[in-house]
Structure formats: structure tokens, C-alpha cells
Image (cartoon, rainbow, N blue to C red):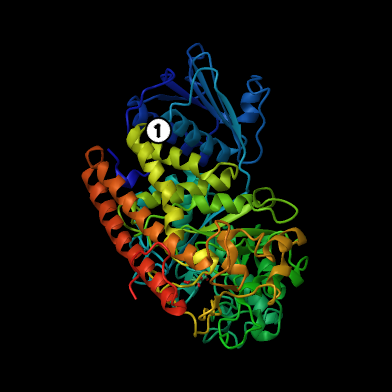
Amino acid sequence: MLKEYDCWLQKRKIGLTIKIPDAVYVQGDSEIITQAAKEYVNGIQRLANVTPKIETKKTANSSLPKAWLGLISDMEKQALFSNLAAGAEGFVIKIADNNIYIAGKDDAGLLYAVFRFLSLLACGKIKDNFEISETPASSLRIINHWDNLDGTIERGYAGNSLFFKNEKIVYDSQRIEDYARLLASIGINRISLNNVNVRNRAKLLITEVYLEQLAELAAIFRRFAIRLFISVNFASPRDPGVLKTADPLDADVIKWWKECASVVYKYIPDLAGFIVKADSEGESGPFQYDRTHAHGANMLASAVKPYGGEIIWRCFVYNCQQDWRDKKADRAKAAYENFKPLDGKFDDNVILQIKFGPYDFQVREPVSPLFGALKKTRHIMELQITQEYTGHQIDLCYLPFMWEDIMNFDTGEKSIKDLIKGFAAVVNTGLDNNWTGHTLAQANLYGYGRIIWNPSLDAKEIAHEWCALSFGQNETAEKISSILLKSYPAYEKYTSPFGICFMVTPGLHYGPNIEGYEYSRWGTYHRANVKEIGIDRNETGFVNQYAKKNADIFSDPKKCPQNLLLFFHRLPYDFIMKNGETLLQNIYDTHFEGYDEVLEMLEQWKRLKKNLDNAVYESVLSRFERQLLNAREWRDQINTYFFRKTGIGDSKGRLIYD
Ligand code: GCV
């Protein structure tokens, strides 16, 4: 039975496909290698209920088969891996003559190899003569927390912060170790703990007020090959009693950040660096001093450079005071307009972090045109695991379904999976016992790690893997996997139609409010009237931010992918879609279908009752019941809205609440 807390690292006696050797020989004694050995022993205990004996060189009995853990460079001497290669953080696993060889390219690679071996073992894939070599596709695999020092989490739906409470660093070290284990098991190698909106006392995280304790947290993550980033406030030097300015070209400001970095690195010598949200949604930034974002980022980069640190600079910069009457302004254009002209002007330890879409983590947006446009600047993609716009972990929405599409998007030159070598994601975890609020939302955290490690994996494979690891290799797992795969299309169908975005309740971002953002300052309008809906993004010029190949597709309503039609075009309700029906009829149909699909998922879940742990069954059931209400609300409000605007009913005669 699933123990929610253990996520995909369940204790379960599996049918073994190889003989597990009695001993494990560990070569190397670094902190991470020692952890890797512990994980091997614990993993074998939880899956096979035996405890392998750890051997060191001196005690090793070389004649017996063993599990061999070490670095590839050491094991290579035995000419074991002649046909397999691995790059940084990669590994090789090989089974031969009752021996298990688990070898990392480096210490982190060994840790990942152990977790991979255990998950393959749990899935029944390890057989005699098995060989595998893997290297992560991305070198930066980051988790961003938006945790506040008071313990709340911005856009968090799984309880309070794992790290902070009442303006203090407060944590359960066993729990943090368990968290680090979960993250390392899916290959995460960087984490930021505090919100990018760095307010009040969070500004002091880079001072001796908090650094000692932060260093203790860093030490736990370090054993799992995870390095910390800290979110900082660009305007910190301007705080009362410090300086009068935060101008990045001011000598005192430069000195202030250098001194700050020297203190921070004294406590956390391997700190990965700082993350900055500047000139964004009310946060200060270089614009206030007539400086560019390159000025701002490079100034901070030079402060952390002596210590090998990096600056992650977010590109979520847009005018959040827009006037809805101004038809020329287009928020979708902002990231490209702000950062493309600066391409090549950033220092080499600056990394731009760009949200995957031009808006803000919507259920359906095109990939931002900034990907593929930046040629001379390091940049990574920001995803959102926490379900801010995708159902608050009340509604089931399996996100790898969307991420698979993003990975395969061709920027005109290369696909995202070939182009982007780093990802960050706002995480969905908190103090809830199951970490993610909705137990099935664990699949989103798992899926993030897996897809950024290997972007060629598809959502289906990941769902199967997660279900098998969480529920065992059985029919129940298969059924849960099929529910997961239905969930994203269903969510997309019952919420805002065809890529139009932002019909959610303002601020909260759960549930429908069709015109909630229509007359506000946020710049996310759909401009529906009695005849038509959408923004013509040929007219605003947004389409031309893409490479020609994509601009040609997006600019033409006949070629534009249908799920993005209303992102790119302003269309009459009688526009004929691919299925020969009008846009309006398609809106009605998708909304009826979306609701029905939630109902079907709920019924499928009910049929699994006898095979599931009761607590898990009940908690997921209650969420499906709430999701059904939400889907009904969306269906009825959207359909009613368009029925009342157009006066044209459903051709199939279904009830629309007018
Ligand atoms: C951390 C959206 C969210 C904000 C978030 C912001 C960001 O606007 O609603 O809560 O702030 O994105 O990514 O900085």
C-alpha cells in the first residue's frame, strides 16, 4: 500500500530479477559517495528486505560477487565499460556474472546511478547482462521555492514552508534530508529556498542574522549533490541605514554587494549564487536608475565571481501598469523586447531565466520567442510545478503532458530539448504529509526531474514509471497512469478556450472569472465582444518575434495549431475550425467534454477503492469531487458567457445556463 510520505521511493518487496550480492564494495569516501552507498543499502533493504554489508578495500573478499560502487575512472581500469560513455554527472550501470557495477562519472553521477539502479530494479528492468549509460541533458536542474520567512508559500498548495516559520529558519532536519533524497533521486542539483519576491526580513538571509542556519541547511543538501541559490532583492543596498541608492554603477553599491558576497561565501563556500527578480511586478531594478538589465546582472555577477558563483536573472519583466484601452501594447512581447537587444552583453556567469511562455504559466501558451532568439547569452527555461493556474493541486493536471510539447517545440533552428541546457521550476511541495497536497501531484515533481534529465522521455513513459514506483507493477498502477494522462487535456478543455489565457479569478487564480482581468492593469486581455474574440498578434507584432518558419505558421489562422488559435488571432465566433464546426460550437463542445472527462476520472478512481490505501483513496476522492465542481463552474460560466454574447445556442441542444 502506498505510503504517501515516501513518494516514489516506496518500501515494497519486489519480485527480484537478479540475485542481490551480500556485499557492496564502495570505492571512495567523499560525502556524496558515502551517501550513495547508504542509499544503495537502504534501497536494497526497502525493495528486497536484505541488508548488504558495506566492504572497504581492506576487508573486501574479492572472490565473491558484489555490488561495486565507485567512479567510472576507477572501474574503467578493469575494462568494464568499454562500450559505454558518460558525461558530467552521468553514470554507467552494468550487471555481469552476478556482480552489479554502479559507476559515476563523478560523485554526483554515482549518487544518481544508485537511484536509477534502484528504480530500474523496482520496475523489474534489471536483468543479467544489463547495461546502461546515462548523462543528464541539462547541467542545471533547479528547484525554486517561493517560500516566505513567515512560513507561507506564494502560490503554494501543500501546506506551509519546509524551511521557514515566524520569520525564522525552522525545519525538521530528518524531513529536509528526506526531501533532498527525493530531489536527488530525480537528478535535481540546485535549489533556492526563498521566494523571488524578497521582502522584509527575507532580505537578511544574506547577512549573519540567518547565514549560520542557512549553511546548516546547505550542508544537508550538499550530501545529496544539491547546491543552494539564494533569492536576493536588487534594492537591498538602499535599505534604511545602508546607502541612498541601489544604482548598479554606483561605486558604493558595487562595494556593498562585494562585501555581502564575501560574507555569504564564508558561510556557504559552494553557494551556487543569487537569483534576482528585478523591475518586475513592483520589485526594484536597474530601470529605476536608467540602467539596463545587463548593468544590474553584471554588477552582481562580478560580486560572486571570485567564489565561482552565478547570477540567475529572471526575464519576467513587463509593464504591470498597462491600460486596457491601449490596443498597441502587448504584454506577450515584453520578455523579448527587454532582453533580445541585450544579447551578448551579459557576463559569462549570468544566466537568464525565462518563463516557458510569453505570459505567465498558463495551461496553454506558445513557447516564448526569446528561446532561439538569444544567441550569445546563457539562458534556461522556467517551468511551474506548483499548480498556480492549473488547478491548485485540487484539480488533477499531469504537467509532463505539457512539458513534452514544450521540449519538442522547434524554435526554427533547434528543438527546445536540443537547445536548452538548464531548467528551473517553481515547486509544488510543502509541509503536508504527502508533500504535494494532492497525492497524484507527486507525479508532477517526479516528472519534472525525469523530463529535464532526459527530454526525450514522453509523458506516457514517465506516468508509467511514476505509477509503477508508487503503486507497484500492477493493474492499479496502469489505471492510475491512464487517469493521469487524461487529466491535462480535460483541464485544458474546461478552462479558457484555445490558448486565450487568463479567464481565472484575479489574484487567486483558481476558478473562472471570464472578464476578471479584462479591465485591469495586468495586460492579459481577450477583448471578447458580440462578434469576435482574441488579440491579433500579427497586428501587435508579437508573431514577428519568432523565427520566420514559426512566424509563418502562427500568423496564419489556417496553419496555427488549433490549441493556440486564440492566443495569436482575433476571430469571429463563426470561424470554421478543423472539424468543420464553428469556433463557438467548438468552445461549447470542449467545455461539455472537459466536464464529462472529470466525471469519468472520478468514476475510474472510485473503481480503484478496494486496491488502495484508504487514506490515499479518500483524500484523492475528495479532490476529484472538488475538481468536478470546479469543472462544472468553468463549463457553465464559459458556455453561458459566449451564449449570452452571441445569442447562438449549442447545435446539440445541451443545456446552457443563461
Ligand atoms: C513570485 C506570477 C505569480 C506571482 C509570482 C510571479 C513571478 O505573477 O502570480 O505570484 O511572484 O509570477 O513569477 O515572479
Position of 531 with respect to 504 (left or right) is right
Position of 581 with respect to 625 (left or right) is right
Question: Looking at this view, is 69 or 569 the one in front?
Answer: 569
The residue type indicated by label 1 comes to Gly
Going by the picture, which residue comes out furthest to the top?
Answer: 63
Q: Is residue 361 visible?
A: no
Q: Answer above or below: position of 76 versus 301.
A: above
Q: Position of residue 644 (x, y in %)?
A: 41, 78
| Mark 1 within 8 Å of ligand 1, using the beta carbon | no
Find disc 1 in the rendering and name its residue: 43
Q: Position of residue 374 (x, y in %)?
A: 74, 62
Question: Looking at this view, is 1 or 61 the one in front?
Answer: 1
Residue 388 falls in which quadrant of the image? Answer: bottom left
Q: Secondary structure at mark 1?
A: helix
Residue drawn at 58 percent across, 88 percent down:
325
Q: Position of residue 416 (x, y in %)?
A: 66, 52
Q: Position of residue 348 (x, y in %)?
A: 73, 60
Residue 389 falls in which quadrant of the image? Answer: bottom left
Q: Is residue 188 visible?
A: yes
Residue 245 falls in which quadrant of the image? Answer: bottom right
Position of 344 with respect to 74 (left or right) is right
Residue drawn at 59 percent across, 65 percent down:
565
Tell me the quarter of the image containing the C terminus.
Answer: bottom left
Tell me the quarter of the image containing the N terminus.
Answer: top left
Question: Looking at this view, is 281 or 322 the one in front?
Answer: 322
* Circle 1 residues within 10 Å: few <14, some 14–19, many ≥20: many
Residue drawn at 63 percent across, 27 percent down:
74
Q: How many marks?
A: 1
